[in-house]
Structure formats: C-alpha cells, structure tokens
Amino acid sequence: MITWQSVPNNIFPYKGVFLMNYFMSLDPLALFRSMPGAFAQGMVWGLMALGVYITYRLLDFADLTVDGSLATGGAVAVMLIRGGISPWAALIFAFLAGMVAGFITGILHTALGIPGILASILTQISLYSINLNIMGCSNQAVSVDKYPLVISLRYLSDSNSTRVQIFATCILFCFAIVAILYWYFGTEQGHAIRATGCNQQMARAQGINTNLHTVIALMISNGLVGLSGGLYAQYQGAADVNMGRGAIVIGLAAVIIGEVIFGRLCAGKNLAFAYTLFSVIGGAIIYYIVMNVVLWLKLPSDDLKLFSAIVVAVFLAIPYLKSTRKGKER
C-alpha cells in the first residue's frame, strides 16, 4: 500500500498526485450518511456530559466515577430488558444504579475523608467487578429484533419515518432532562449545591450542609451518566464492561466545546443556565461530528482516542489563548 511516507522527497510532484488521489477517494455522500448517527450518538452522550458538567463546573469536583457508572447503567438496562422488563423502565433502573455509584463516591469522600479524585477512582475500579457480576460475563447483547428498544442504531438505517421518530425521541428526552435540571437547580437545594461548589467555607457559614449536598450532586451526576449508559447500550445493541472507558474525556470535551462555541450566546440571557445546559449537549453533538469527519478522512481508527485528546486540548487552550491575546492588546 502506497502511503505519503513511502513517496521519496525528491519526487515531490508525485506527492501532489498522491494527495489528489487521496482526496478524490473520499466520498462526500458517505460523510453525509454518517451525520444522523453522529447527531443521535451526540444527544445520547450529551446526557452523560450533563452529568460531567454538574460535577466539573457546578460542584468543582474531579469525578472519575463516570467511566464505571456509564457501564453500570448499560449493564443494568440490558440485563433487565433481557429479563422481560420494559426498555423504558430499564432506563429508570439505570438512572438509579448510577445514583448508587455516585452515592458511594460521595460517602467515601465526605464520611471517610478520602480526596475526591481518589474516591472516584476507587468506585470506578470497584464498578468493573460489579458490572461483571451483573452481566455474568464481559458483555451481553440485546437485539432490536427481539426487544422494542427505545433507541437503536438499526432505526437510523430504516425508513425516513423511523428516523424522524428516533430523532424526536432523542430531542424530547434531552429537552425533558434539561427542563428538570433547570427547575431543580433553581430550587433552594439546587442553589445550595451551586453554593457548595462555588465556596464551601461561605456555604457552611450560611448554614448549608456541604457534605450532604456534595453527595446529592454526585448522585444526580452519576444518575444521568447511568441513564446515558442505558440509552447507549440500547443504541449499540449491547452492554460491555469497557463501554465507559474514556467517557470522562468525551464528557469534558462536550462541556468545553459547548462553552467555547456557545458561551457568548448563553451569557446575559434570562435563561442563561438553560442555554448552558443545551450548549453541553450541542458540544457532544459537535464532538461526534468531528470524530465522524476524522473517520471519513480515513485516518487510523486506532488513533481515535489520540484525536479525541487533541480536540479537547485545542478547545481547552482556546479560552486561555484568547485571554492572553486580549491582555497583550491592552
């Protein structure tokens, strides 16, 4: 197979031919056909990113539990569906399973005094064995031909009406979750969680039980991650103990991309917090569009995690570079 590196430097014109042949081999229609999957997958993972946003931005807590709780949500959902439970009801149990994982991390941190990042790593490691026990093996399949799944990759290849149905389901699901979160964080308890993440000492001075609200925030966050895991397991037709590996990177990417691209649109609005939550989901969609473009360009799929890290690093650096540039102009 001829590659760019295999072409000698002393025959540069042939490299031009190589590039021309490379770009001519790309199929724009293939990229277009992959976009519905990117949008659907982005909305599913956007729910997980909302959970990451709660701990990363609101609580200021480095929570690595998500890599394990996403797989737990998927494992619980798949096993319940295989046991005859409705796929919709299975999502509720996936949410509850994620909340239990968040509760364990919270107790390790608040009651036992273990630093947050270490507490979340301990929970994540434990969940690997727990997920194996839930499924009885490393993975379990759930076929759309046998079960009426809420969402499935197969639906995207069916008729246009089925595609419209799956997108309507995803959009309504995201709107419902954002509406509930917007309402909840506007309540007294929601404000207490935000105050705990902003300044724990000041929150305690106001009589807020910061330990309790830290645990609650972790439960809500990992509950959303577990819910996303349940949806993703149905989407791909299987649950796997490693399906959550790298989930924290995707979640952070969605949060950062959403803030960088939609940050100015959200600032100063009456419903700024709601816009911010939607921007996180939008960030997840953009992330998967970028990943689809990477695959469409025929770059090595083994390097996908590397490309993910580069995308996150670039969007993390943009705010800093902007502020540095403004400082120099002044």
Image (cartoon, rainbow, N blue to C red):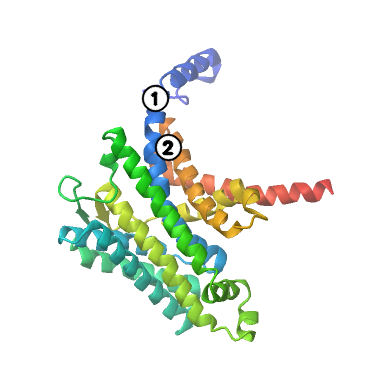
| Up/down of 235 relative to 192, above or below | above
Q: Position of residue 41 (x, y in %)?
A: 38, 46
Q: CA distance from mark 1 to mark 2?
A: 13 Å
Q: Which residue is mark 2?
A: 292
Q: Would residue 108 be found to the left or right of residue 255 on screen? A: left
Which SS class for mark 2? helix
Q: Position of residue 317 (x, y in %)?
A: 63, 49
Q: Nearer the N terminus, badge 1 or badge 2? A: 1
Q: Amino acid at mark 1?
A: Leu
Q: Residue at coordinates 15% horizontally, 48% vertically from top-left?
A: 146
Q: Amino acid at mark 2?
A: Asn
The disc at residue 230 is none
Q: Would residue 315 be found to the left or right of residue 119 on screen? A: right
The disc at residue 29 is 1
The residue mark sitting in front, 1 or 2, is: 1
Q: Residue at coordinates 30% horizontally, 64% vertically from top-left?
A: 92
Looking at the rendered image, the quarter that the N terminus falls into is: top left
Q: Quadrant of residue 186?
A: bottom right
Say if residue 38 shows up in the picture. Answer: yes
Q: Position of residue 31 (x, y in %)?
A: 41, 30
Asked whether 324 or 174 is in front, the reply is: 174
Which SS class for mark 1? helix
Within-10-Å neighbours for mark 2: few <14, some 14–19, many 20+: some
Asked whether 104 or 160 is in front, the reply is: 160
Q: Position of residue 316 (x, y in %)?
A: 60, 51
Within-10-Å neighbours for mark 1: few <14, some 14–19, many 20+: few
Q: Residue at coordinates 56% horizontally, 54% vertically from top-left?
A: 275
